[in-house]
Image (cartoon, grey):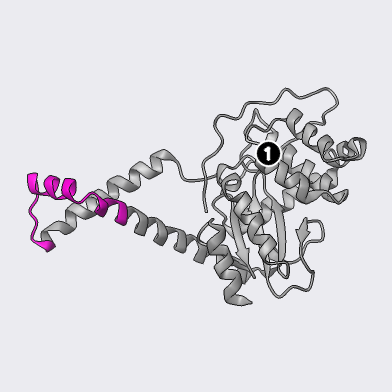
C-alpha cells in the first residue's frame, strides 16, 4: 500500500485570489517505497540466498555467483515474497488499530461517498491526488465501482505529499471537497486523478470545466471547516498507522495490496 512521492511536481504559482493552504506534515505517514528501500531489500534477499545455499549443497564464492547468475529468478521470488509478507504484517497492524478504535473508520457525513448508505459492504480509500500509485489504480478502481452499485465507496482526502514549498495536494483535496458540496465530486475526482501535472491553476481550471460555481468553490476551499475535515482525516491516518497512499479498507479490514482486483476479491468475500 505504498507509492513514491511525486518528485517532479513543481511549486504552483499561487494566484492572488487563491487562499493560502497549510498542510499538516505527517510524521508516521510519509508516502512510500523508495528506490533505496528497494535496493536494501534486494541486498538483504541476496544475503539470505547466499546464507541458504549451503543447505542445498551449494558452496560459497564462485559457486554462489554462478548459481545466482544461472537462477536470477530466485532473487525476484524472494523479494516478492518478502514484500508480500511485509505488506501483510503492516495491514495486520492496521487491522488491529482499527478493531481497537472502531470510531476511526466510523461514518463521517463530511466524506464524499458513492453507493447506498445502508450497504452491506463499505470500501474506504485514503488517497492523495499527486500520489502516483493512486493515479495508477484510479481508472480500474472506478471501473470496479461501476460493477458494484450495491457497495458504499467512501473517499478520504489525505494529502500527504506536499512539503514546505508546495500546497498542491492539499489544494486539490480542498477543491474536491468543495466539488462534493456542489454534487460534482466524482467528475472532479476523476479529472484530478487523470491529470498528470497538477498545479493550483490546473485544479481551478478543472473546477471551471466541470461547471463549478467558482465563488462558492473558493469559499469552501478557504473554509476552516474544510481545513478541519482534512486535519481530522490526517489524525485518523496516523492513529491507524497508515504507511502511505492509497490505502483501502473493506468493512474495516485493510487491504495488503493497492490492486483494485484484490480489493474486489475482499468485497466478494463479504457480500
Q: Nearer the viewer, residue 203 or 49?
A: 203
Q: Position of residue 214 (x, y in %)?
A: 89, 36
* The magenta segment: 55-77
Q: Is residue 101 left or right of residue 21?
A: left
Q: Position of residue 195 (x, y in %)?
A: 66, 37
Q: Position of residue 13 (x, y in %)?
A: 72, 22
Using a 10 Å C-alpha cutoff, classify the residue at mark 1 as few (fewer than 14 neighbours), some (14 to 19) or many (20 or more).
many
Q: Is residue 86 left or right of residue 249?
A: left
Q: Quadrant of the C terminus?
A: bottom right
**Image point (71%, 68%), residue name:** 151
**Image point (73%, 43%), residue name:** 173
Q: Main secondary structure of the magenta part?
A: helix
**Image point (82%, 29%), residue name:** 18
Query: Magenta stretch containing residue 74, yes or no?
Result: yes
Q: Which of the 4 quarters of the picture holds residue 135?
A: top right
Look at the numbered disc 1 and give the secondary structure of its residue: helix
**Image point (62%, 33%), residue name:** 163
Q: Which of the 4 quarters of the picture holds residue 241?
A: bottom right
Task: Specify whether residue 128 is in view.
Answer: yes
* Picture layout, residue 55 above or below residue 167: below
Task: Specify whether residue 24 is in view.
Answer: no
How many numbered marks, from 0 up?
Answer: 1
Q: Position of residue 147 (x, y in %)?
A: 66, 64
Query: Magenta stretch containing residue 176, yes or no?
Result: no
Q: Which residue is mark 1?
A: 169
Amino acid at each position: 500500500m505504498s507509492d513514491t512521492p511525486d518528485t517532479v511536481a513543481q511549486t504552483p504559482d499561487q494566484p492572488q485570489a487563491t487562499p493560502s493552504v497549510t498542510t499538516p506534515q505527517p510524521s508516521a505517514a510519509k508516502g512510500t517505497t523508495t528506490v533505496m528501500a528497494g535496493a536494501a531489500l534486494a541486498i538483504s534477499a541476496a544475503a539470505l540466498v547466499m546464507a541458504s545455499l549451503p543447505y542445498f549443497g551449494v558452496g560459497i564464492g564462485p559457486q554462489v555467483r554462478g548459481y545466482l547468475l544461472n537462477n536470477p529468478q530466485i532473487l525476484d521470488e524472494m523479494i516478492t515474497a518478502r514484500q508480500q509478507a511485509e505488506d501483510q504484517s503492516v495491514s495486520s497492524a492496521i487491522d488491529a488499530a482499527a478493531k481497537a478504535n472502531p470510531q476511526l473508520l466510523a461514518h463521517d457525513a463530511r466524506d464524499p461517498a458513492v453507493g447506498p448508505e445502508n450497504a452491506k459492504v463499505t470500501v474506504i480509500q485514503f488517497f492523495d491526488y499527486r500520489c502516483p500509485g493512486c493515479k495508477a489504480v484510479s481508472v480500474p478502481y472506478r471501473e470496479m465501482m461501476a460493477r458494484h452499485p450495491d457497495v458504499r465507496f467512501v473517499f478520504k482526502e489525505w494529502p500527504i505529499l506536499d512539503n514546505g514549498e508546495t500546497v498542491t495536494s492539499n489544494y486539490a483535496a480542498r477543491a474536491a471537497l468543495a466539488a462534493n458540496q456542489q454534487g460534482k465530486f466524482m467528475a472532479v475526482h476523476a479529472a484530478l486523478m487523470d491529470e498528470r501535472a497538477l498545479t493550483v491553476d490546473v485544479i481551478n481550471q478543472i473546477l471551471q470545466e466541470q461547471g463549478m460555481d467558482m465563488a462558492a468553490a473558493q469559499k469552501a476551499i478557504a473554509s476552516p471547516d474544510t481545513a478541519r475535515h482534512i486535519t481530522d482525516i490526517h489524525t485518523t491516518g496516523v492513529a491507524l498507522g497508515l504507511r502511505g497512499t492509497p490505502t483501502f479498507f473493506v468493512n474495516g479490514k485493510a487491504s495488503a495490496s493497492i490492486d483494485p482486483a484484490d480489493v474486489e476479491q475482499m468485497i466478494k468475500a463479504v457480500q
